Image: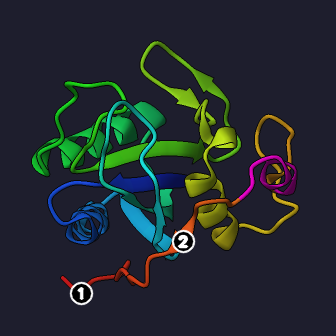
Amino acid sequence: MPVAYIALGSNLENPARQLQAAADAMAAETQIRIIAGSSVVRSAAVGPGPQPDYLNAVVAIDTSLPAETLLDRLQAIEHAQGRERAIHWGPRTLDLDLLLYGDQQICSPRLQVPHPAMAQRHFVLYPLAELCAADFVLPSGETLAALLSNCPADGLADSGITLDYHPQH
């Protein structure tokens, strides 16, 4: 089973609750097992107009789902939590991005893996670095350390929030 990395983000309707509900929903999936989760960071919104700050985290999962089926499940979780796709980069209740899927590079009309913008997103790279060794090599051949060196953590803050990545069901 490939190890996949999922970025979680929210800046609407109690973001900490949204992230926990997303982790719970992933843990409830029979073909997804959360291996580890990062701390929760706070960052300024990237997008149009004034928006509340985001809470972000990353989870590592084992999954038997093909990548596009995993994407479908993640989008179903977003939808169940009120995600609306009205404004590109607008505020959202939940954003789940498939960052990495094993050592695969995927380029389809619906999915690009590694996530095409992750190298520019400190709110993704630093939580990911909590779960991977600095010499972790992405499918592109780049190391996580190289990406981190080009993406300062400026404006990234510890939120003080802890998620339960392994809830008892």
Quick one: quadrant of the N terminus?
bottom right
Tell which residue pokes out farthest to the front in this image: 50
- Residue 6, percent from left and from top: 48, 53
Q: Badge 1 is on which residue?
A: 168
Magenta extent: 145-152
- Residue 71 marker: none
Pointer 2: what residue? 157
| Magenta stretch: helix, strand or loop mostly | helix
Which residue is the extreme one toward the top? 109
Residue 151 falls within the magenta-colored stretch? yes
Magenta-drawn stretch contains 53 = no
Which residue is at a point 29% across and 55% down the rendered structure image? 11
Name the element at disc 2. Answer: strand
Q: Residue at x 30, y 34 (%)?
A: 90
Inspect the image, locate mark 2, and give the three-letter code of the amino acid beneath it.
Ala
Q: Which amino acid does label 1 sit on?
A: Gln
Say whether residue 64 is left or right of residue 15.
right
Query: Residue 109: percent from the left, percent from the top?
Result: 46, 12
Colouring rule applied to residues: rainbow
What percent of the width, then of the height, locates residue 124? Answer: 57, 54
Q: Could you give the CA–CA distance between mark 1 and mark 2, rounded to whole angstroms? A: 29 Å
Measuring from the top left, give residue 151's x and y in whole percent: 75, 49
Crowd tier of the residue under label 2, counting other residues whose Cα lies within 10 Å: few below 14, some 14–19, many 20 or above: some
